Image (tube, rainbow, N blue to C red):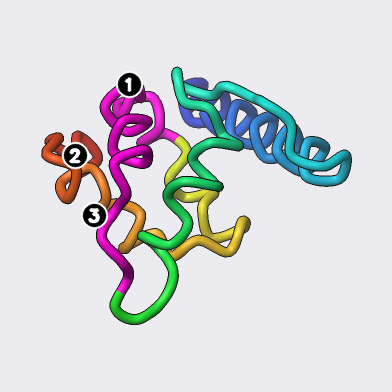
């Protein structure tokens, strides 16, 4: 039960951090070893549209540097940012990296 509470608190803190960052405009913020501004700029087209575009080289470079197991903890927050979780979870595989979230 304590583990569940600590996970909820951690997710809440990340959500609040992202909300504050969004309210002030996106700045360079690193979460799980990934530049959140860069991922937004470079990978958005890979999660938007039907069908989504192929991830750019710059997007894949960011994914290669990311701590994906760490990001898995926050995947359920993606929908609050307007990101299609299913499409986002496909990006690592499309960039040649195994997705540890599955």
- Nearest the viewer among 91 and 78 is 91
Tell me the residue at 34%/81% (across/down).
Answer: 50
Q: 18 left or right of 56? A: right
Q: Are marks 1 and 2 in contact (CB under 8 Å)?
A: no
Q: Position of residue 24 (x, y in %)?
A: 88, 39
Magenta segment main secondary structure: helix
Q: What stretch is highlighted in magenta?
A: 52-73
**Classed neighbour count for the residue bearing mark 2: other residues with Cα under 10 Å, few (<14), some (14–19), many (≥20):** some
Label 1, label 3: how far apart the Cα atoms are: 16 Å
SS label for mark 2:
loop
Q: Quadrant of residue 101?
A: top left
Eye-nearest disc, 1 or 3: 1
Q: 21 left or right of 66? A: right
Tell me the residue at 19%/43% (across/down).
Answer: 95
- Nearest the viewer among 85 and 3 is 85
Tell me the residue at 28%/38% (across/down).
Answer: 60
Residue on which the image places disc 2: 99
Q: Do the residues labelled 3 and 2 touch (CB within 8 Å)?
A: yes
Is residue 53 found inside the magenta-colored segment of the image? Answer: yes
What's the mark number on residue 36?
none
Q: Residue furthest right?
A: 24
């Amino acid at each position: 039960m304590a583990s569940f509470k600590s996970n909820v608190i951690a997710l809440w803190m990340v959500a609040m951090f992202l909300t504050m960052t969004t309210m002030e405009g996106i700045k360079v913020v690193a979460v799980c070893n990934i530049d959140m501004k860069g991922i937004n700029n470079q990978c958005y087209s890979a999660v938007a549209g039907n069908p989504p575009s192929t991830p750019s080289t710059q997007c894949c470079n960011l994914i290669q540097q990311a701590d994906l197991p760490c990001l898995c903890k926050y995947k359920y927050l993606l929908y609050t940012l307007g990101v299609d979780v299913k499409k986002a979870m496909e990006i690592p595989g499309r960039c040649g990296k195994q997705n540890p979230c599955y």
